[in-house]
Amino acid sequence: MKTISRCVFAFIAVVGIALAAAAADSKPVFLYSRYFNARGEARYLPDGNYKPLLQRLATDFEVRVHDLPLNHATLSGVKVVLIANPSDLAVAGNPAPHHVTPRDISALIAFVESGGALVVMGNQENHNLEIVDMNKLLRQFGLQFTNRYTDAKLIRVPKDTPVIGGLAWAYYTGNSILIDSAHKARPRSLVLNDLSVKPPKGERDEPGALMAAAEPGRGRVIVVTDSGWLADWAFDEKGVGGVALKGQDNWEIFRRLARWAAHLN
């Protein structure tokens, strides 16, 4: 009997060690959601100029990509959701894209408040960007996109900025963020436009927030006003539209933000 007991305890110990090892090896799930991107939209494709981003994220995350509705089932087990450049209009020969609905808002609020993270990225005005319905979601966190634009420039993030301080952000043009500082989600700016730095090409240069964060419930929300900064041509500094911003830390900025959003830091 004692031999059997010792065998049982040994088996339990081995199983416990195996489960602990499996838990240690598991990674939080990072979902790149294409649900709000129009079919046929070629910007920021997971197998296109966002491929290096998703490959790099695989070091810290289990990376998923799909265009399914965001609801309890599809968000189950997900830690971070990325939405980039939500589409306004249909691409020729394709159906109209999904815009944010009250059902989407309810699902994403529940997801974030229970500990999930949401990253939403805007863009410039000629990139088929939808903000009217997306703002109905972002207002729940005290944030809104505005139609005020800043041209591409290299911004040195102040050293005292939480999470990403001291890094250089190659910002490739986008809109601005309106912040309701009284909102219960505690929204605040992460990066303000540095008006002392002039765009190398273009004259648009609006004051205000280009990146912001909020912490509703147990979750975290990050809003960025550019989607191109994570493209391969930003990482390799080849640039786009005749502008190539050198000496950037874009990947490191996003890596730190993603880890912070997932509570890995």
Image (tube, rainbow, N blue to C red):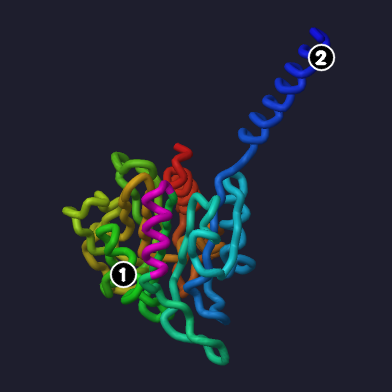
Is the magenta region chiefly helix, strand or loop?
A: helix
Task: Please tell me which residue is depicted at 30% across the width and 53% down the height of the picture.
Answer: 191
* Image location of residue 45, percent across then percent down: 58, 70
* Image location of residue 193, percent across then percent down: 27, 59
Residue interval drawn in magenta:
103-115
Q: How packed is label 2: few (under 14 Cα within 10 Å), some, or many (20 or more)?
A: few
Q: In which quarter of the image is residue 50?
A: bottom right
Circles 2 and 1: CB atoms closer than 8 Å? no
Task: Looking at the picture, tell me which residue is in the foreground, 19 or 159.
Answer: 19
Task: Please tell me which residue is depicted at 40% across the width and 50% down the height of the picture.
Answer: 168
Task: Looking at the picture, tell me which residue is in the foreground, 9 or 236.
Answer: 9
In the rendered image, the residue lying farthest to the top is 2
Is 109 covered by the magenta stretch?
yes
Task: Please tell me which residue is depicted at 33% across the width and 41% down the height of the picture.
Answer: 162
Task: Please tell me which residue is depicted at 31% across the width and 60% down the height of the picture.
Answer: 210
Quadrant where the N terminus lies?
top right
Quadrant where the C terminus lies?
top left
Question: Considering the numbered disc 1 on the image, is that residue within a helix, a strand or a loop?
Answer: helix
Mark 1: amino acid? Asn
Question: Considering the numbered disc 2 on the image, is that residue within a helix, a strand or a loop?
Answer: helix
Q: Can residue 55 be seen in the rendering of this structure?
A: yes
Q: Quadrant of residue 222?
A: bottom left
* Image location of residue 144, percent across then percent down: 27, 66
Location of mark 2 (residue):
4
Q: In this view, does 189 lie above or below 173?
A: above
Is 21 covered by the magenta stretch?
no
In the rendered image, the residue lying farthest to the front is 1
Q: In this view, does 46 lie to the left or right of 11?
A: left
Location of mark 1 (residue):
135
